Amino acid sequence: MSAERRPKSSERPPSARVFFALWPPAEAAAQLADVANRLAGQWGGRPTRAETIHLTLAFLGEVAVAELPALCALARGIPGRSFAIRLGHFGYWPKNQLLWAGCAAVPDELVDLQSRLQARLGGKGYRTRPPGQGFTPHVSLVRKMRCAPNEGRISELPMPDKLLWPCPRFVLVSSVLTPEGPNYRILEAFPLSA
């Protein structure tokens, strides 16, 4: 009998919590983190740290580590064109106590990329959102906001004038939850054509 420990059949293989996202350049992330800090200071809540600011395209949750190469291969095969987003307004989801920034005009290339990604993932059996839930491109800024802003106050919030977020690629990200908030690691980047 081998001295090696044999895994029990009930043990799950190693997994990672992963999602596909757009990742901002450092300057845009710093500007958004500054906005998040100011708003959290005004209304309470936990501001998003600059190094974790992103726009989720598809959240997969726990995936077996052995499946990650296949996910990367799937993403490499998705055609798409590079684009830029301009975050021009804020929104608030009371159920999640979440203040977010969104696009006043969502680029067609973003909608196309997200649709193609969803279709490929769905075709491989991945469920990335509840049935019937649409895609609202957004960047989470403040979580667990203690004081919910009303619609009038949200529309008056200051967004940096020159905040343009170029999107030449999308990424697969691993997320590890900690008491201080999530820590993210980009597993692979997938370039978009010019």
Image (cartoon, helix red, strand yellow):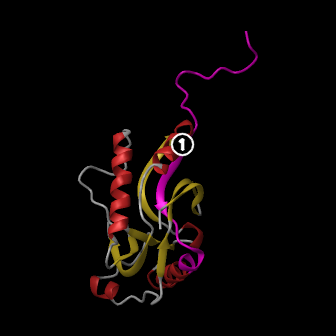
**With respect to residue 125, does 40 lie above or below?**
below
Q: Horizontal placement of 90 versus 68: left or right?
A: left
Q: Horizontal placement of 47 versus 93: left or right?
A: right
Q: Residue furthest front?
A: 194
Kindly identify the residue that appears in the image at 69 percent across and 21 percent down: 5
Q: Residue furthest right?
A: 3
Check if residue 28 falls in the magenta segment. Answer: yes
Instruction: Give the residue number, with chain letter if any, for mark 1.
Output: 68
Specify the quadrant that holds the N terminus: top right
Q: Residue furthest top?
A: 1
Kindly identify the residue that appears in the image at 52 percent across and 47 percent down: 72
Q: How many marks?
A: 1
**With respect to residue 9, does 67 lie above or below?**
below
Check if residue 132 falls in the magenta segment. Answer: no
**With respect to residue 72, does 162 lie above or below?**
below
Kindly identify the residue that appears in the image at 65 percent across and 20 percent down: 6
* Residue 65 percent coordinates (x, y): 56, 39
Amino acid tagged 1: Leu
* Residue 135 percent coordinates (x, y): 31, 61
Image quadrant of residue 97?
A: bottom left
Q: Which residues are magenta?
A: 1-30
* Residue 176 percent coordinates (x, y): 57, 53
Image quadrant of residue 185?
A: bottom right
**With respect to residue 67, does 117 lie above or below?**
below
User: Secondary structure under badge 1?
Assistant: helix
Question: Mark 1 Cα within 10 Å, few/some/many (few <14, many 20+)?
Answer: some
* Residue 132 percent coordinates (x, y): 23, 53
